[in-house]
Image (cartoon, rainbow, N blue to C red):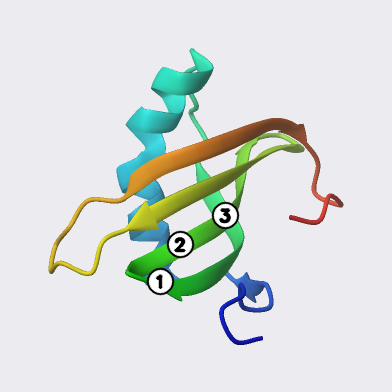
């Protein structure tokens, strides 16, 4: 859909690298430390850069949904927008 988010896609190493850069921001917002921080699925939206919706496994059966933005500048760091805790593997994002 033009202007909308893509259909959910399986994790890639490129997007996992974005997730890895977001980990400290997520931990700061949730006041938790995650030993597991593995991307499962993601969607993107092309804007002035990229918006991401991310489904991240943070424990045994525990997931979070994260919304983030990466500016269109080379090597720009992603910025955390929102974290939804208490999600499960079956929750759509």
Q: Which mark is residue 51?
A: 2
Residue under the point 59% across and 87% down:
2
Q: Secondary structure at mark 3?
A: strand
Q: What is the spatial separation of the Cα atoms under label 1 and label 3, in whole angstroms? A: 16 Å
- Residue 71: x, y in percent? 26, 61
Badge 2 crowding class, 10 Å Cα cut-off, few under 14, some 14 to 19, many 20 or more, is many
Q: What is the spatial separation of the Cα atoms under label 3 and label 2, in whole angstroms? A: 10 Å
Q: Secondary structure at mark 1?
A: strand
Q: Which residue sits furthest top?
A: 31
Q: Secondary structure at mark 2?
A: strand
Q: Which image quadrant for residue 51?
A: bottom left
- Residue 16: x, y in percent? 42, 59
Numbered disc in front, either 1 or 3? 1
Residue under the point 81% across and 56% down:
92
Badge 3 crowding class, 10 Å Cα cut-off, few under 14, some 14 to 19, many 20 or more, is many
Q: Which mark is residue 54?
A: 3
Horizontal placement of 88 versus 2: left or right? right
44 or 33: nearer the viewer: 44
Horizontal placement of 51 versus 1: left or right? left
Q: Answer with mark 1 or mark 3, whichever residue precedes in sequence.
A: 1
Badge 1 crowding class, 10 Å Cα cut-off, few under 14, some 14 to 19, many 20 or more, is few
Residue under label 1: 47
Numbered disc in front, either 2 or 1? 1
Horizontal placement of 86 versus 46: left or right? right
């Amino acid at each position: 859909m033009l202007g909308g988010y893509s259909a959910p896609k399986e994790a890639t190493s490129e997007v996992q690298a974005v997730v890895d850069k977001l980990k400290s921001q997520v931990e700061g917002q949730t006041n938790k430390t995650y030993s597991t921080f593995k991307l499962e699925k993601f969607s993107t939206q092309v804007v002035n850069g990229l918006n991401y919706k991310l489904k991240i496994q943070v424990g045994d059966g525990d997931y979070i949904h994260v919304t983030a933005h990466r500016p269109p500048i080379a090597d720009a760091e992603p910025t955390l927008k929102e974290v939804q805790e208490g999600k499960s593997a079956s929750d759509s994002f």
